[in-house]
Amino acid sequence: MTGLSDSFQRPINYLRISVTDRCNLRCIYCLPAEGIGLMPRQALLTYEEIYTVAKAAAELGINKIRITGGEPLVRSGLPKLIQMLAQIDAIDDISLTTNGTLLSGYAAELKSAGLRRVNVSLDTLKQDKFEFITRRTTSLGDVLDGIEVARSAGLNPVKLNMVVMSGINDDELLDLATKTITDEWHVRFIELMPSAGVSTRASQFVPVSDMRKRLELLGELEPCLPSVGNGPAKYFRLPHARGTIGFITPISEHFCFHCNRLRLTADGKLRPCLLTDYEIDLKLPLRRGISSAGLKQLIKEAVTNKPLRHHLAEGYTPKNRPFSQVGG
Ligand code: SAM
């Protein structure tokens, strides 16, 4: 087999890069209300360092990159990084995960820098609930504008991610799903994962099987292929819908056996799994002038040590970093 593959023969071709641990929101499922210290700025990889890692990874077989965070658009000059990454020959897909609050101002520039598509977190269509979930008074309208501007800029498909929480936003499942008919939205419903220090609880978990039952009120869900990408979501269409509904089941039906990902944290640690604590430091070697061959060796080591699966269902949650640092 050519390219990168781990000890379980899974091909690894996808690198998710967290460019910052900072975020302008503080979502209840992602971050504690307070008490998470921010990384010092000099601890963050520079864009040149990120480029060096991405290039080495691409030479080993990575061809897809997603930029995430924290909130990636709060880091200044992000289009410059996209432009640098787009110049790497083997990289044929660069995407971004964002909360959408700043997207309308950046979408066109990101597109011309080489970004292909965006995923936007959208957990509610109601302003008061948006403020409750994000713990900020930011306007939900900014996110909705961001979505429309991104669609017009051609960052398609814009996928909208909703983390479904019982008693908080699960009453909006049908409203979001209806948008796949009325507005051709591509909506993905995500099971709530436990995360260290956050205020959401296991009792707020809604399994996808439950979500699907509730959505049957809108008609039969017809399986369909994703319009792009081959990630963990399973896709469906409602009758007469041009948009799609995706389900992501990290808990009720984990998809580790098909996992093709590596993650680079904002402070330069390479993690082969979001949900286990194992990571390899690349920042110090980079700052000490490691050769490209040496860097590739470290990347291969992380891939070799990629765990078979996570153990959330057995109660194991990663201890050392919230999602804002690893990039959910
Ligand atoms: N700031 C960006 C955003 O809001 O999309 C990117 C970072 S955020 C950590 C990326 C994604 O992580 C969110 O869309 C959310 O779906 C997911 N996420 C974070 N915490 C989660 C949790 N406890 N359970 C499920 N998904 C979570």
Image: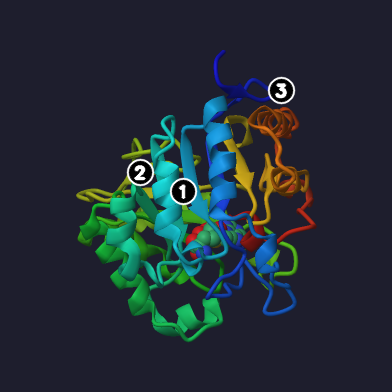
Q: Closest to the observer: 130 or 267?
A: 267
Q: Is residue 29 left or right of residue 103?
A: right
Tag 2 or tag 1, which sits nearer the N-term?
A: 2
Q: Is residue 165 left or right of residue 122?
A: right
Looking at the rendering, the quadrant in which ligand 1 lies is: bottom right
Image quadrant in which you'd find residue 171: bottom left
Q: CA distance from mark 3 to mark 1?
A: 28 Å
**Picture coordinates of residue 35, whole percent (x, y):** 75, 77
Determine whether the beta carbon of the residue marked 2 sits less than 8 angstroms from the nearest atom of ligand 1: no
Tag 1 or tag 3, which sits nearer the N-term?
A: 3
Q: Amino acid at mark 1?
A: Phe
The residue drawn where x is 34% and y is 46% is: 116
Check disc 3 and report the residue beneath it: 7
Q: Quick check: marks 2 and 3 in contact, CB under 8 Å?
A: no
**Picture coordinates of residue 259, whole percent (x, y):** 59, 34
Q: Residues within 10 Å of mark 2 (few under 14, many from 20)?
A: many
The residue drawn where x is 48% and y is 42% is: 65
Q: Which mark is residue 236?
A: 2
The answer to whether residue 63 is visible is yes
Q: Residues within 10 Å of mark 3 (few under 14, many from 20)?
A: few
Above or below, 59 relative to 170:
above
Determine whether the beta carbon of the residue marked 3 sits less than 8 angstroms from the nearest atom of ligand 1: no
Q: CA distance from mark 2 to mark 3?
A: 33 Å
Tag 2's secondary structure?
strand
Q: Amino acid at mark 2?
A: Phe
Q: Amino acid at mark 3?
A: Ser
Q: Which mark is residue 247?
A: 1
The residue drawn where x is 65% and y is 67% is: 41
